[in-house]
Image (cartoon, helix red, strand yellow):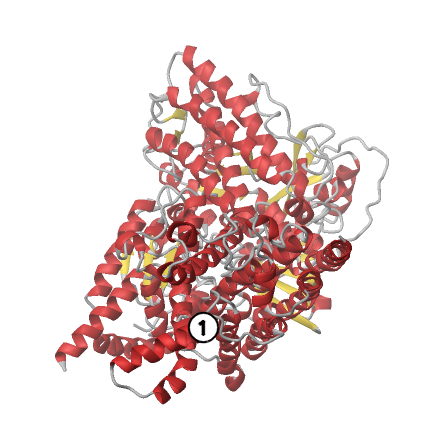
Amino acid sequence: MNYLYCAFIEFLAKFNLPESIALIIFPVLPFCIVAAGMLVMVLVLVLAERKILGFLTQRKGPNRVGYWGLLQTVADGLKLLCKENITPTSADKFLFTLAPIIAFTPVLVVWGILPYNSEFDLMSTPANLIIYLFLAIIPVLGIFLAGYASNSKYSIIGGMRVIAQAISYELPIVFSLLGVVVLSSSLNLTQITLSQSSVYGVLGWYIIPSFIGFIVVFVSILAELNRCPFDLPEAESELVAGYNTEYSGMRFALFYITEYAMMFANAAFISVIFLGGYLSPFGSYISNIVFGDSLFANILVYFEQTFWLLLKTGIIIFLFMLVRATMPRLQSDKLLKFSWNIMLPLAILNLFICMVIKGLGGLL
Amino acid sequence: MSRMKLNLGPQHPSTHGVLRLILDVDGEKILGCEPVIGYLHRGMEKMAEGMTYLQYLPTVDRVDYLSGFFNSYAYVAAVEKLLGIQIPQKAAIIRVMLMELNRIASHLLWLGTYLLDLGAVSPFFYTFRERELILNFFEKISGQRMMYNYFIFGGVRSEIDCLEEVEPICKTVLAKLEDYEKILTENPIFISRTKNLGIMDRETAFAYSITGPNLRASNSHLDFRKLSDLYKDFEFKIAKAEDGDCFARYKVRLDEIRESVKIVLQAVEKLKVAGGNINTGLKPLNLKIDTGEAIADVETPRGLTSCCVKADGSDKPYRVKWRTGSFYAVQILPKLLTGHMISDVMAIYGSLDVMLPEVDR
Amino acid sequence: MNLIVTTVDYILNWSRANSLWPLTFATSCCGIEMMQTTASNNDIARFGSEVFRNSPRQADLLICAGTINHKMAPVLLKLYQQMAEPKYVIAMGACACGGGMFCNNTYSVVNGIDKIIPVDVYLPMCPPRPESLLDAVRKLQAKIKKESITKRKEFMECHRSKLSEKAEILVQAPDLKIVKTDECYLDFSLEFECKDYIQTPEINYIPDYNSELLNNLANLKASGFNILTAIIATDYRDCIELNYRLYSTFQSRFFDYKIYVQSEADSVISLYPSAYYDECEIYDMFGITFKGNSNLKRLLNPKSWVGHPLKKDYELKDERLVWNE
């Protein structure tokens, strides 16, 4: 961080601006970058999902708006922004408006926690893994509120399902993460990332000792995100549109953005925990291999690190989409049984394996 | 959550039309269900009384738009019975071939939409792709994709001049069927969603007048094709399953596609050598039929369809009555759904393959 | 000022035209072609319209695919009212445009949905090909691109008042009251008594009201006729014929058992549960009541319907419900 901060002060000095301005602007600036990046990323993700689903089902997907359909989601967003906002007369008007905001706000913070590269690490508190887990569950509360406030039967069933699902699948996630915490002896996402670095690249990642944990977290995060095959809260063929049945216009768009932003955040979270975050899969960074240890190479490394993180996240997201195109939906009762009977024991087994590996590592 | 009424439909994504189900639920558990039908009631039986025999012919395709040929056949066969005419051999073979192709198309559509109800997106696109091949063929011979109006009193309307296209279609369908089975038959989620769900035993099915694949999935041999003169020269097995659950109904339909392909291929071989007329040359414009009544039965993809035509000597039917399979499949829904979860409603309802136009007529 | 309005119009219309999310609303045949339009061969996704929303709140486009009858009309109006502005309608298929095949000789079909809701694009044909639906979407896009927010507002307000008038007329049509659970389900769990095999009786015609119907059908059932495929009713003006069409899976044959009644018959649901819908339909269409069937209701027509359509003295009127234009 210091390095960037000095560069920023130098940048300001060119315009004859005092250092105190940097003191005010600098902490805010990264969050603005994150927020802007998030909106762009959501637009990209929605389009990517439609394109990839189209590709998997032998269709072209949107291709008329802008070059190759690139502006499709921009048009969608603009339209939703200007659409009429309907509040049903029977709804709880205050909660009905509040729910999408509650769902959306924590997503911004969650994006700020993730370490994008070794400098751009905004909330590197000692236990930001815990903070992440707490914040990532808040959108569920927003969704439940939406279901409750709409006062529609489909919505309330969707809201109930979301709570049941979140409670059952939060536990396996926590237990699997405990395995990683044991391996890395840290609750800090940056520390966890760095402890995966080794000269052998991929071999140092926690996906290898804690492969079961990776699978459990992947499946559970699918459930947390309400994505297929766990998309029960908005099961289109059963509950019409689930919790957001009564939402229109911008409030609906907020749920939409939350869904995709959380998808990206959680995918990035998986890659930080299990796939070495921003580390290069080759042990050392390509920039360093090509340009040596020059200043230029060191600056390039930051971009490379972000690139690796985005690439890993992209792969995870592609897997999410692949699953969506392949699987039918589970039943609600079997969904819960699946969590308690299979996911949780597996997560505990994983924790046990991780402890044994850690113990062996200590002995050797 | 306490007890409440949940209203599904008439505009609901998975009812494939306009069925309304009033569910009595406790949380997610279904305590009772009342189907409400009639949202697509078009009065087709009354309509017949105001039209001549020929005018009514194009409309019968709409009784069940996924199996237009079968409805055409039922009406046309009833009128032929009244007139006492025999259709030429070649026309009979063409009818069999087209009806079986239609059965394949109908079952393919069922498969795609059923999986859409279960939450799987892709199979819908795949089955529609294959169905399109069949529809293109139908369009070439009849000029329409869904409402063919191709069977006429005493035979069929025109020669088939693109017979060579049938065999490739059959081969593609068979090959793709293997793919579907690979995705589905051993998919644990699919199995858990369909096995031991909505079980209907044979006696219940008889009591509720269930016919077609739904009945044959409940361990019965009843297939009205075996009674029909039309099919007596064709060899095919009756697709059958024993469990009576949703998975059995899925298996039966997939097996039926295979059997239908067999029949189609036999028909193609027969048509290659068959000669003679394709219709009796009856002039249907001012057709008047003496007093009498005739009922024609046909095994459609959704069970037994009977068309009862009563004539009174004028040029208009005195009464036309349609008996369709789906009408009775809706009736059994309360019995099948009670005790299951909301997620299972669509799995069970979808497995019965109910077509609403057929229910409401 | 004008410049600002036109620029805003341009951007808004561009976004609206390119992001038409249709409502999943299909009543009949055209719905299948609509599904085909989303499928691989025709792929409506290219125009950004593959996002079929099931909730009317999030949809922009109501593709009315199929016939609308008098029972469905209030539902259609309600759906349209539930949609958020701006909303557009494509009347797909001849039935939705003007009644199509069903505009004559029938009693239950609304001749064109424009009697209920405003329509932007008419797409006739029975049913339209997927390509024509794509064309209709393109036409609608072209129309939207010519719109102006100021005019749209006027249009909206004008239609709001008209629609609420229509809603008042329509409300009386469907009876949305729900019967208590304990009453509305038939208990079909009756045990059948299996009698010994009796020779198939030679009854085909019983002149007047028959007290023997149940007995005879019970005999037939015991002799193997285990499926009641249908009850076919015909109005012969002086009496109504009921043809109980039985099928035996043991003998592989049909048996027509006919009776002639005036206005009342015995219910056979205790023997053949499948007769329940048949009897309700006959009650609806012919006005015959069935003794022993305590849940007779109008099955196909709305509960408030007057008359029994399949009786020969039923007069067909062009419009059963009068719309205020």
Q: Nearer the viewer, residue B293 or A188?
A: A188
Nearer to me, B111 or B92: B111
Q: Position of residue C50 (x, y in %)?
A: 39, 54
- The location of residue A144, given as percent across then percent down, is 59, 74
Identify the image quadrant of residue A12.
bottom left
Q: Which chain carries label 1?
A: A
Q: Is residue A155 left or right of residue A186?
A: left
Residue tagged by mark 1? Answer: A254
Position of A241 with respect to C260 (left or right) is left
A18 lies left or right of C307:
left
Tally of numbered tags? 1
**Residue C249 is at least partly visible in this image:** yes
Residue drawn at point x = 40 percent, y = 87 percent: A24
Q: Position of residue B63 (x, y in %)?
A: 47, 44
Check disc 1 and report its element: helix, strand or loop.
Answer: helix
Q: Which of A58 and C163 is in front in this view?
A: A58
Q: What residue type is labelled 1?
A: Leu
* Left or right, A126 with reference to B110: right
